[in-house]
Image (cartoon, rainbow, N blue to C red):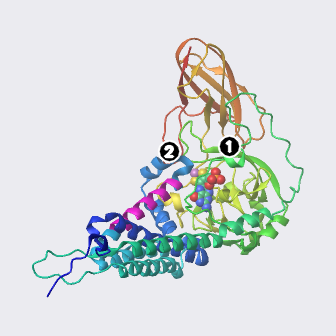
Amino acid sequence: MTTTVAPASEVTPTTPTERHPGLAVLLGIVCGAVAIAVAQLVAGLVDPDASPIVAVGGSAIDASPEWLKSFAIRTFGSNDKAVLLAGIGIVLTLIAALLGIAALRRPWIGFLGVSVVAAMGAVAAVTRPTARPIDALPSIAGAIAGSIMLSAFLRVVATPPANTPSDPPTPIGIDRRRFLLVGAVGALAAVSVGGVGRLFARRFEADASRAAVRLPSPAAAPPSPPPANLDVRGLSSFITPNDRFYRVDTALLVPAVKTEDWQLSVHGMVDRELTLRFDELMARPLIERDITLTCVSNPVGGPYVGNARWLGAPLADVLREAGVHPSADQLVSTSVDGFTVGTPTAVVMDGRDAMLAIAMNGEPLPLEHGFPVRMVVPGLYGYVSATKWVVDIELTTFNAFDPYWVRRGWAQQAPIKTESRIDTPRSKATVSAGIVPVAGVAWAQHVGIDAVELRVDEAAWIPAELSVQDTIDTWRQWLVRWDATPGEHQLEVRATDRSGAVQPAEHAPPFPEGATGYHVISVRVE
Ligand SMILES: Nc1nc2c(c(=O)[nH]1)N[C@H]1C(S)=C(S)[C@@H](COP(=O)(O)O)O[C@H]1N2
Ligand SMILES: [Mo]
């Protein structure tokens, strides 16, 4: 028997995979991308919240301990969700790459890996607060697509002829060209399926629904124009523009609700259950009010406070129609994504402008701020009052139910604490000697701000000039023209509310019922 040795140029097209980890990584990532794209597509059809990525992320948010959440808010601010999604993306990419490498040697590991990852996505999806069993479907569809892609890849992995006993074991070979072709087709499929998936995203429909809203005017005289801003560069404007308004919520995917799908049900300890549709809400007598919102997580000097002009239906009127039982001391509101808020019924009914808001600064609520309807209650931190995407109000008792953040240790009742902030100069700034405008905002919602004082290097307190009071529910701007002398200086601010109480000096962290203490900064004067 003669053996012909092929010339080098005709050597077998197969190459050992061990020498091409890049191909194995490509295989894993393309299979993963196809799986995710199909899962997203199906989620777009079934329920965007059923996306395994969104569900896993949401579960991670709910499961993460308080210190981690506070750290994320402090470090990434409103980008915390983007950072989480990027983290999930990186982890998934790594898992896919490792599975790709493993699958080329032991295909069953690849298939098992796809199933395990999909099972985690499915479990996360069906255990979300508003989940239905069908929410497992996107993960299952993704697993099937990923497995089909994996077997397509493995089919082009050629097994060379059996080795003769004396040969060292020959690694499995790959037809590289066909392998790359399958990879390219897979990647293309992932991109186009993902693109189609986006078309189904409810976000676009909700945007269109928002654009179609024609806001009614308030029933009574509209509010007077907001007070003039003090003319200081670097000072927060009295009205916070919508696109600069802080955002805090647990929603990984901004809920996208169309006005025609929205309805609010009012039930529990009431004489008559009610449901309100969006057009019915808009047809009610509306009020428009300037109200400063504050997050309980706002540290002293922090950014989670903003002031807007809200248009909405008085909540007390709705409750009177429903006939609230006297013992129903807690009003539990729930958002479309299952987030819950507990508000004292007595506060909502005490005459303040608690409302079901439909507009913010003259526009329908931005999706991020609760479109189409959210609650706003002057004087209470957001987590006990400001439910975005609100769809359900149940009258109950504080004994009977703990809402989302209360279950996690935050205070059951949480009026906003009097605070003041130095906006300019910034901490650690260097300024020139002479007259330096020191300015900021102070708030004591539903009590009102009476005075603000500034202290330099623990000398005497200097009274600040205040912007005209709008209402007791809004913050006020303050200004001190400071005659700055060269050197390092420490500036401190404190407010006094309309009851005569000076803002507490004692430092308290945001947990569990809001931060206290003076905002202190240091500046360098040259
Ligand atoms: N549905 C929903 N509503 C919510 C929240 C949330 O997580 N989900 N967070 C609350 C908190 S903690 C605050 S401070 C305010 C913030 O409102 P904003 O994002 O419009 O500023 O919304 C409140 N309403
Ligand atoms: Mo908050």
- Between 222 and 2, the one lying in front of the other is 2
Pointer 2 residue: 74
Name the image quarter holding residue 152.
bottom left
Pointer 1 residue: 445
Looking at the image, residue 502 lies above or below residue 8? above
Q: What is the crowding at mark 2: few (fewer than 14 residues within 10 Å), some, or many (at least 20)? A: some
Percent from the top left, x then y, of residue 120? 41, 73
Report the residue at 49% width, 74% height from top. 185
- Between 55 and 176, the one lying in front of the other is 176
Determine if the C-beta at disc 1 is less than 8 A from ligand 1: no
Point out the tag, 1 or 2, that comes first from the N-terminus. 2
Give the amino acid at mark 1: Gln
Please say whether residue 162 is visible from this viewpoint.
yes
Give the amino acid at mark 2: Arg
Q: Is residue 335 left or right of residue 12?
A: right
Report the residue at 88% width, 57% height from top. 219
Percent from the top left, x then y, of residue 435? 67, 15
Quadrant where the N terminus sits is bottom left
Quadrant where the C terminus sits is top right
Give the extent of the magenta segment: 82-98
Q: Give yes or no for residue 147 being in the magenta stretch.
A: no
- Quote the CA–CA distance across marks 1 and 2: 24 Å
